[in-house]
Image: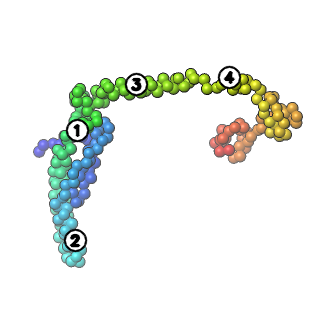
């Protein structure tokens, strides 16, 4: 008996009614589904089951015997169907001699080099990808070097920032306490869950992790 040598990535979609398989490329995962092959033993069993139901179980024993016979016959038919499926889909795959992967001819095979594109990438495609990456990197660098703050905005940023006292509402320009009422300008906050002191802008408590 000749052993079947083929891709290891496949799904068996076979049922009692027939046989069907899906084979996948080891590199990109592209799949090919074979044509459905009806199971003769499955159709015989189905016919016996229907007859048994119509005759109130008279043929029940016959159907059970058929199932037991069908099990062995089905396995043999399954092996033949798998071998046929391999032959059907095999032209779409080729095994790389370097990495031994079974890859699809359409997307992952470098016919010029006689190797898969994992082992022998297409030069033009790699150059194009490298060019695109370099273009993006240079564009990001150019954006970082560009001045987006106007001279007017820079002057405004240099001026003292005016804040408002959280207690009396008076305008303040710095310091730790309000010059009008003496209240601290930086209000203290405490966690609503554990009571720990937390930063004024904290969204979560650094002690217990509770959301604030």
Residue drawn at the location 23% of the way across and 59% of the way down = 16
Helix, strand or loop at label 2? It is helix
Marks 2 and 3, the one that precedes in the sequence: 2
Q: Distance between the residues labelled 1 and 4?
A: 64 Å
Helix, strand or loop at label 4? It is helix
Residue drawn at the location 22% of the way across and 69% of the way down = 49
Marks 1 and 3, the one that precedes in the sequence: 1
Marks 1 and 2, the one that precedes in the sequence: 2
Which residue is under mark 4? 151
| Mark 1 in CB contact with mark 2 (< 8 angstroms) | no
In front of the other: label 1 or label 3?
A: 3
In front of the other: label 2 or label 3?
A: 3
Report the disc number at residue 50: 2
Dot 2 alpha-carbon crowd within 10 angstroms: few under 14, some 14 to 19, many 20 or more: some
| Mark 1 in CB contact with mark 4 (< 8 angstroms) | no
Which residue is under mark 1? 93
Which residue is under mark 3? 131
Marks 1 and 4, the one that precedes in the sequence: 1
Residue 97 point in image, percent of width and height: 22, 30
Helix, strand or loop at label 3? It is helix
């Amino acid at each position: 008996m000749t052993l079947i040598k083929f891709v290891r990535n496949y799904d068996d979609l076979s049922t009692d009614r027939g046989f069907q398989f899906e084979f996948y490329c080891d590199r990109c995962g592209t799949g090919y589904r074979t044509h459905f092959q009806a199971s003769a033993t499955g159709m015989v069993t189905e016919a016996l089951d229907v007859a048994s139901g119509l005759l109130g179980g008279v043929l029940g024993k016959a159907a059970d015997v058929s199932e037991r016979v069908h099990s062995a016959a089905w396995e043999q038919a399954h092996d033949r169907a798998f071998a046929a499926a391999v032959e059907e889909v095999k032209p779409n795959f080729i095994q790389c001699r370097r990495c031994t992967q079974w890859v699809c001819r359409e997307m992952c095979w470098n016919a010029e080099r006689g190797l898969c594109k994992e082992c022998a990438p297409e030069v033009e495609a790699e150059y194009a990808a490298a060019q695109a990456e370099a273009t993006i990197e240079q564009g990001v660098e150019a954006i970082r070097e560009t001045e987006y703050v106007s001279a007017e905005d820079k002057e405004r940023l240099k001026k003292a920032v005016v804040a408002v006292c959280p207690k009396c509402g008076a305008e303040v320009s710095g310091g730790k306490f309000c010059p009008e009422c003496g209240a601290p300008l930086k209000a203290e906050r405490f966690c609503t869950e554990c009571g720990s002191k937390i930063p004024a802008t904290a969204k979560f408590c650094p002690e217990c992790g509770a959301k604030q």
